[in-house]
Amino acid sequence: MSIRVDSLCHVYHPGTPLETRALAGVNLLVERGEWIAVVGQTGSGKSTLAQHLNALLLPTGGSVTVDGISTTGETAALREVRRKVGLVFQYPEHQLFAESVREEMAFGPKNWNFSEEEINRSTIETLTLLGLPLEFLDRSPFQLSGGQKRRLCIASVLASRPDYLVLDEPTAGMDAPGRKELLALLKCLVKEGIGVVHITHDLELALALADRVLVLEKGKTIFCGTPDSLMDELLDRPLKGLCLPPILDLVSGLRDYGYSIPYTLDPDALAERLEREIRS
Ligand SMILES: Nc1ncnc2c1ncn2[C@@H]1O[C@H](COP(=O)(O)OP(=O)(O)OP(=O)(O)O)[C@@H](O)[C@H]1O
Ligand SMILES: [Mg+2]
């Protein structure tokens, strides 16, 4: 059970003066119960890739298959792909459309023929999971704050109980506690067996949390592997558009200075090790 992306290419507006090659041969495997982070500089193709994973965009070349179903298949197959893969958009304004939070939450489940009772249950459970009060049910989604809108986008996608969740910059606009809660929730979902694709500009977060990290540059894969191997790679040579997280930069400087400190993203572990080094 996995999403497979093979040699994926995407061209916007082909054959017109606006023609743009956004993806030029991307490979990726997402298993259920795995957290994949996608990083890369602005315009590298992350959102374009995200939209291919639930068949919102279709390949110009190469293929995307979800649990064996190709996104270039017939309409019924595309519907099944969209049921399996929930996509949370980069900008809440591109996703939210309903007049009330209740309608926003019910839209997906209704579309997948959930019963009234299931719709109510999943609405309440998912809003609560995302820390949104039920008093919001009759409010317009557009009256919510930026962080609340983002939570609503995630809740409304989760309400359909997808097998995979693709989140495009989900922590943007969230305060530190909200961000921490969301990341803990994603961890739980991964443990429950959902495959998570997390698009982020935050390399430190990707290195700390993901099982594997995909790095895109100009629509091409320039790295795909474990956080440890990416850390080694980054210490060896800079990857375009990615800066070493400050804590790794600090460790690197301390090592140059003669301290024998392992690379870590955990500030407490670094402080403890440094104290020991200074004492010895
Ligand atoms: N609807 C569109 N029509 C034409 N070109 C597009 C469209 N959407 C994206 N592009 C182009 O495709 C390329 C990849 O864009 P994409 O939005 O996938 O990048 P991104 O990595 O998500 O960037 P960001 O980090 O800024 O969100 C860019 O050159 C962009 O200008
Ligand atoms: Mg984007």
Image (cartoon, grey):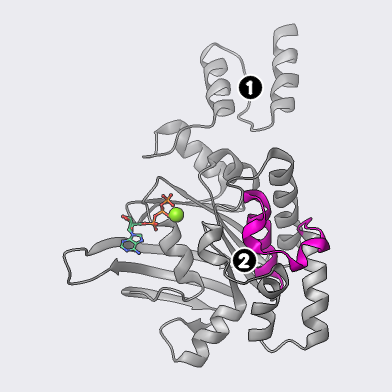
Residue 8 at x, y percent in the picture: 37, 68
- What residue is shown with label 1? 261
Q: Amino acid at mark 1?
A: Ile
| Badge 2 density bin: few <14, some 14–19, many ≥20, Cα 10 Å | many
Residue 242 at x, y percent in the picture: 43, 38
196 left or right of 130 in image:
left
Q: Which residues are magenta?
A: 130-159
Q: Nearer the viewer, residue 47 or 94?
A: 94
Does any portion of residue 280 appear in the rendered image? no
Q: Secondary structure at mark 1?
A: loop
Q: Amino acid at mark 2?
A: Leu
Residue located 52% across and 57% down the image: 91
In the rendered image, which quarter is residue 158 located in? bottom right
| Badge 1 density bin: few <14, some 14–19, many ≥20, Cα 10 Å | some
235 left or right of 250 in image:
left
81 left or right of 22 in image:
right
Prevailing SS of the magenta stretch: helix
Residue 49 at x, y percent in the picture: 43, 63
Q: Which mark is residue 165?
A: 2
